[in-house]
Structures are given as C-alpha cells and as structure tokens.
Amino acid sequence: MHNTVRASTTMHLVVSSELSFRIVVDLDYDGADPFAVRFTFHLPGDEPVAWVFARELLVDGLGRPSGEGDVRIEPIGDDLAEAALLLRSPEGDALMHTAVPPLLAFLARTDRVVPMGQELAGDDLDQELAGILSATGPGNAG
C-alpha cells in the first residue's frame, strides 16, 4: 500500500494590486504517483478546482522562478518567505500568493514517503526492468 500526504493551507487569490481573497487549498501527494502533487482550490461560490503538476516544479519554484506553460512558481522578495503561483487555463489566469513554510513542510512529508530523486527506486524499478526484459527477451528479438 502506498502512503499519501495531505495538508491544507490558505493562499491569496490576487484579483488586483488592491484586492485579494483568502482561499483554502488542499495539498495532496500519493506515493503511487511519486512525481506529482495535487492542489485543490476551494473557491468561494464555485466547485473546487484541482491542478496536478510536478513535485519537482514546486520544489524548484520556491527558490527560483520555475515552470513553463500552465503552471509557474516563483519566490516573492529576497527572504523567500512567500511565493507566487500562476495558473493558466483557457478560461483565464489565476495568480496566488502563499507563504512558503507550509509548502516546505508538505514537501518534507512527501520526501519521507518517496525521497526526491528516488521515484523509480525499489519495486517500481524492478517492475520497470522486468517489463523491459520480458519485451526484449529470447524469442522477442527482431
């Protein structure tokens, strides 16, 4: 059985330089999908919206601008205490500001489930190798 990590935090949905809303965001990590994290945003008056993206992107984005395309993360200020999360979709963009410590605590817990860089270690690697070997074993060679 794979371990999961769940946490909750608040972020600020930035509407303009003068207006933002606090929203609850659920953070989820499942060791069965070790490369991904899921953020579920609980928007006022709407159904929750979930975004799934690379755990490595979250790690990188807390220290330096990271990401291309739909998800971008970057630190705010010199002290790295806050980060900006920009989500892009056909319906529009959403800019979130968040404190970094809750995200670091979440990432530390995910690292105890599956250490960064070891996503394909152990049984997963054995299964990958077995699949490759069975596809190229005797009688399967071209």
Image: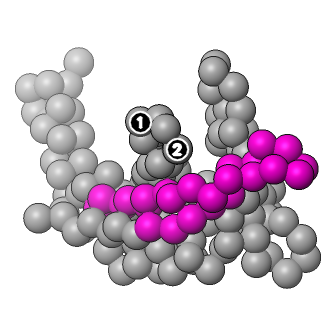
Q: Which mark is residue 113?
A: none
> Viewer-proximal residue, 102 or 42?
42
Can you see residue 129? no
Q: Amino acid at mark 1?
A: Glu
**Is 4 left or right of 82, judged from the image as shown?**
left
> Helix, strand, or loop for circle 1?
loop
- The residue labelled by disc 1 is 47
Rendered view: 98 above or below 67: below
Q: Residue shown at 51%/68% (left/top)?
A: 9
| Stretch of the chain drawn in magenta | 8-31
Q: Amino acid at mark 2?
A: Leu
Rendered view: 55 above or below 4: above
Rendered view: 108 above or below 71: below
- The residue labelled by disc 2 is 43
Q: Residues within 10 Å of mark 1 (few under 14, many from 20)?
A: few
Could you say where residue 121 lies in the image, as x and y percent from the top left?
A: 31, 66
Q: Are marks 2 and 1 in contact (CB under 8 Å)?
A: yes
